Amino acid sequence: MARGPIEAVTIDFYNTLVFHRQGQGRGAAIVDYLKENGLEHAPWEHSVLYEVFEDHERRYPASAPPEVKSAYHRHLAGRLFDRLRVRVTATELSRHAPDLWRILGPSCFGVFADAFETLGALRTAGYPIALVSNWQSGVRHFCDELGLLPLVDHVLGSADVGFAKPDPRIFHAASDRLGVPPERVLHIGDSFADDYDGARAAGFVPVHLVREPGAATDAARVVRRLSEVPAVVQGISDASGAAE
């Protein structure tokens, strides 16, 4: 276990570890796809993702052969079209399913260049890590397919835990799983309200990730690149040691 006031790290998922490859988000990409294919649909709402992925953690065959995964992709496409009231035949649904999975699934995300390096450095230094995300059910599967799962010890998605940031309960659930008191956990994320204020209210040590050059923030601890986090953790520990 690492020494010093910080004994563990929690980290956000979207726009902290990963980014949308097209820079628009999955909702906008789905709406564009439906329009391009001449498919009428009900208005898009962000809650659609949570409803469509409601059983993803339980049903997704992460280690299954391709044909089993293809059947699940058709299942997911059916849930999406039912929710958006898109009328298609079974044959058309099967045709759309692979494209819809590419839009909704993990391949639409890229991992920031400094994410693997940062997580690896923290683990090498001895800090257990929990991912804490406002996300649909099954974010653990996304982490797995993006290569992030081996670098974190716990994955907590809001849909699976039952609480969303900035609710302190999702942070406390993370500290419980880590076995570390909140005041000894550093949390890093890109949202000031959800990650910085939420973590601070939960008793964590918060750090605001602000990647945009020149963007302002009221946070007391700020990093511009994720790769700065290990040095921040070490700096806090050094300051605590000097104070003692």
Image: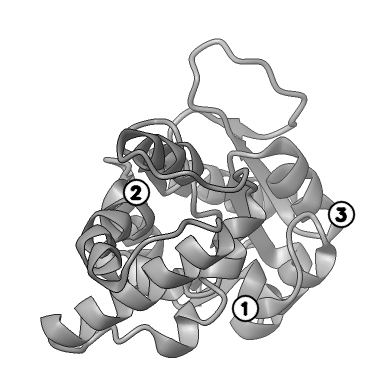
Q: Position of residue 119 (x, y in %)?
A: 37, 58
Horizontal arrangement in the rendering, residue 220 relative to residue 120 (left or right)? right
C-alpha gap between disc 2 and disc 1: 24 Å
Q: Position of residue 33 (x, y in %)?
A: 35, 40
Residue 145 sits above or below residue 108 on the image: below
Mark nearest the camera among 2 and 1 is 1
Kindly indicate whether the residue at mark 1 contacts the one at mark 2 (C-beta within 8 angstroms).
no
Hey, which residue is sitting farthest left in the picture? 66
Is residue 231 in view from this perspective? no
Q: Position of residue 144 (x, y in %)?
A: 31, 72
Q: Check disc 2 and report its element: helix, strand or loop.
A: helix
Residue 115: assigned label: 2
**Callout 3, which amino acid?**
Ala
Is residue 161 in view from this perspective? yes
Instruction: Give the mark, 3 or 2, whose residue is nearer the N terminus.
Output: 2
Most foreground residue, 178 or 145: 145
Q: Position of residue 177 (x, y in %)?
A: 63, 84
Q: Check disc 3 and report its element: helix, strand or loop.
A: helix
Instruction: Give the mark, 3 or 1, whose residue is nearer the N terminus.
Output: 1
**Callout 2, which amino acid?**
Ala
Instruction: Give the mark, 2 or 1, whose residue is nearer the N terminus.
Output: 2
**Callout 1, which amino acid?**
Asp
- Residue shown at 80%/44% (left/top)? 197
- Residue shown at 72%/44% (left/top)? 196
Most foreground residue, 141 or 121: 141
C-alpha gap between disc 3 and disc 2: 26 Å
Residue 160: assigned label: 1
Task: Name the residue that disc number 3 marks.
Answer: 201
Kindly indicate whether the residue at mark 2 contacts the one at mark 3 (C-beta within 8 angstroms).
no
C-alpha gap between disc 3 and disc 1: 22 Å
Q: Check disc 1 and report its element: helix, strand or loop.
A: helix
Q: Residue 241 is drawn in which quadrant?
A: bottom right
